[in-house]
Image: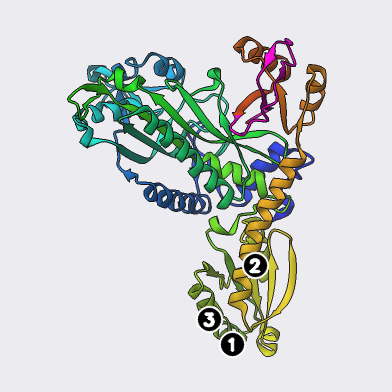
Amino acid sequence: MAKKITKRDQDYSQWYIDVVKEAKLADHSPVRGCMVVRPNGFAIWENMKAALDKMFKDTGHENAYFPLFIPKSFLSKEAQHVEGFAKECAVVTHSRLKSVDGGVEVDPDSKLDEELIVRPTSETIIWDSYKNWIQSYRDLPIKINQWANVVRWEMRTRLFLRTMEFLWQEGHTAHATKEEAVEETEQMLEVYRTFAEEYMAMPVITGVKTESERFAGAVDTYCIESLMQDGKALQAGTSHFLGQNFAKAFDVKFQDQDGEHKHVWATSWGVSTRLIGGLIMTHSDDQGLVIPPKLAPNQVVVVPIYRSDEQRAEVLEYAEPVIKELEAKGISVKLDDRDNYKPGWKFAEHEVQGTPIRLAVGPRDVENSNLELARRDTLEKNIVSREGIAERIDEMLQTIQKDLFNNAKKRMDDRTRSVDSYEEFKKEIEKGGFIYAHWDGSEKTEQQIKEETKATIRCIPLKPDNNSGECMVTGKPSKRKVLFARAY
């Protein structure tokens, strides 16, 4: 199976497509720019969702659901918001079809009085509800999260990384003070950083977006930026301090303890199925998908090997208590006892699909009280004792999780450097990776760099070097270096 996968050093883009296809993560759909998420891909998303959902609830958030359709007039209430999303909106203009000559066409009599927007994001529809929910300081804070799908009419798409419709979560909170809202924004950025590094084993740099890169309608956009194996950056999550922009647009006020009416302060934050693309490009290899154990649909697969019904019964009887021991340790296990596939084919399938550990059990293993253990990330294979197998595998899964992070962190560190001159920057950006450089803070200079090098300012890091200097382009004063990269 792995022979179908293009090597990364030959064509990285094709390699990515091949891994998605061969690991059975997703397919292109009949609707251009959309995708069908297959069970393997959706299982990874479910594990991501479960981990994040717990982290959200542990920080005091509740889940709710808001409509898919948004009245067009809502988007026009916040000027920056509508300007940011106007070119990406799908618009519903009619409510029904009618049969014509064996086919269907739009019924012109069903034209809507007001067009509906298929949600590109939910700030406007949610703040219309918050207006009804908030009257007093006693109603605050409101900390809501929504798991949903959104539509953004993208012209250039790639499975998981950028599609017209995608799955995500979007948090929306309302607070009595600016300080509380900023604290919330920073807290959720830390939740995303923790999830990326501890679950996805994907190292990230945290920072604030420049004004031109902010979310439409935000005062500040915080982000986590990761580096893929090809040296391109991926924005993996964002947390926005919205100030009072949406509260004022929808006139959402509360009465404080002194009886004064004030506009609330707001945040929003989200990650999407783009994280699956990030996981693929951070860890996978020329053999296929590699998944961190904490997010693997199955952490261990057990493949029985036999040539007769008698051997089959013997091997399965031997494997059953092994599986129960692993499950008792909280390890997710799959027994692959399909009769219509040979063991070698199964090995290849589970390798390309990224199962962290494979156990093979044959008659000789039963006789010697052993197991064949294969580790996906290193492709190492060993014969191990049946004794203490659950403890051994539990420790190995933890080791794999740490090793994947450490390998990705080393790769990111090795490809992160600092430059002082624009000429040096132009040379270094061709090699890929993260580059720290001084910037004068102007949008004009930022745009010039983007046009001339295709590199963007990924973020103004939250951990600055505090070394002032001169902009590499204009020579004007710069308080600190910012992070550049070419990006997805």
Closest to the camera, between mark 3 and mark 2, is 2
287 relative position to 264: left or right:
right
Disc 3 crowd, CA 10 A, few/some/many (<14, 14-19, 20+): few
Q: Amino acid at mark 3?
A: Glu
| Nearer to the camera, 66 or 466 | 466
Do residues under tags 1 and 2 come within 8 Å of each other at their CB atoms? no
Q: Tell me which numbered mark, 3 or 2, is placed earlier along the sequence.
A: 3
User: Which numbered circle lies on residue 320?
Assistant: 3
Residue topped by disc 1: 314
Task: Tell me residue 100's x, y (percent).
Answer: 30, 24
249 relative position to 226: left or right:
left
Q: Please determine whether, in this image, residue 112 is positioned above or below residue 169.
A: above
Predominant SS along the magenta part? loop
Do residues under tags 3 and 2 come within 8 Å of each other at their CB atoms? no
C-alpha gap between disc 1 and disc 2: 27 Å
Task: Tell me residue 255's x, y (percent).
Answer: 20, 26
Residue topped by disc 2: 396
Q: Is residue 84 visible?
A: yes
The quarter holding residue 170 reads top left
Q: Amino acid at mark 2?
A: Met
C-alpha gap between disc 3 and disc 2: 21 Å
Residue numbers of the magenta segment:
461-487
Q: Secondary structure at mark 1?
A: helix
Q: Secondary structure at mark 2?
A: helix
Colour pattern of the rendering: rainbow
Task: Tell me residue 329's x, y (percent).
Answer: 51, 73
Q: Amino acid at mark 1?
A: Glu
Q: Tell me which numbered mark, 1 or 2, is placed earlier along the sequence.
A: 1
